[in-house]
Image (tube, rainbow, N blue to C red):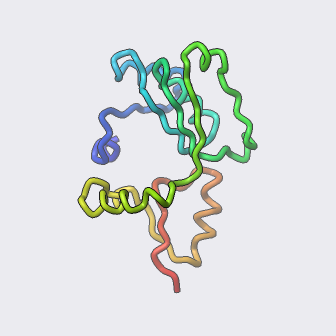
């Protein structure tokens, strides 16, 4: 959890053995009992999506960019009654618009964004398949970047 704090996390939670509801309760406790305004699910599996939802405050928004797992096959069960009662909204997003690249690159140049600290592995082009083979079982962590093309 030191790494997350080094990357700018205000607080961290050890989620081992916790349900999405319990994780949401911990997030709400950290945020003064209210929950977060926006939660991002970048994984797409049921537990991650539900955890993101249960962490929201009333009127909160969930942005999901992760595609579901082979097990979920694109179908997740959602707590619709809670979504209505809490006025939660959910939106999907695929990728990062190219129109945002100049602003992001300026932030990197100014030192406000430091993407290198999220890179956990560098591979050659001929080894990309091994990375793709590990992804469905969540054996990758952080960003894997192709740095050798010959």
Residue at the outermost left position: 110
Residue found 36% across the figure and 34% down from its top: 12
Front-lying residue, 95 or 138: 95
Q: Is residue 34 above or below residue 64?
A: above
Count of numbered tags? 0
Front-lying residue, 25 or 88: 88
Front-lying residue, 36 or 110: 110
Query: Residue 36's spot in the image, x, y percent?
Result: 42, 26
The answer to which image quadrant residue 79 occupies is top right
Residue at the outermost bottom position: 150
Res 20 visible:
no
Query: Is 50 displayed left or right of 111 in the figure?
Result: right
Q: Is residue 104 above or below residue 87?
A: below
Res 14 visible:
yes
Query: Is 105 displayed left or right of 77 in the figure?
Result: left
Query: Is 64 displayed left or right of 75 in the figure?
Result: left
Query: Residue 66's spot in the image, x, y percent?
Result: 59, 46
**Where, quadrant-wise, is the N terminus in this rendering?**
top left
The answer to which image quadrant residue 11 occupies is top left
Q: Is residue 56 above or below residue 69?
A: above
Residue found 48% across the figure and 53% down from its top: 141
Query: Residue 56's spot in the image, x, y percent?
Result: 48, 24
């Amino acid at each position: 959890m030191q790494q997350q704090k080094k990357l700018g996390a205000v607080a961290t939670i050890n989620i081992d053995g916790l349900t999405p509801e319990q994780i949401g309760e911990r997030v709400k406790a950290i945020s003064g009992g209210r929950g977060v305004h926006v939660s991002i699910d970048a994984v797409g599996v049921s537990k991650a999506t539900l955890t993101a939802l249960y962490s929201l405050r009333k009127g909160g928004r969930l942005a999901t960019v992760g595609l579901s797992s082979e097990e979920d096959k694109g179908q997740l069960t959602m707590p619709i009654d809670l979504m209505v009662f809490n006025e939660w909204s959910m939106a999907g997003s695929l990728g990062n618009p190219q129109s945002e690249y100049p602003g992001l690159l300026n932030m990197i140049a100014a030192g406000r964004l430091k993407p290198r600290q999220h890179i956990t592995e560098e591979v050659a082009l001929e080894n990309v398949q091994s990375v793709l083979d590990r992804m469905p079982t969540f054996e990758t962590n952080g960003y894997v970047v192709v740095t050798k093309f010959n």
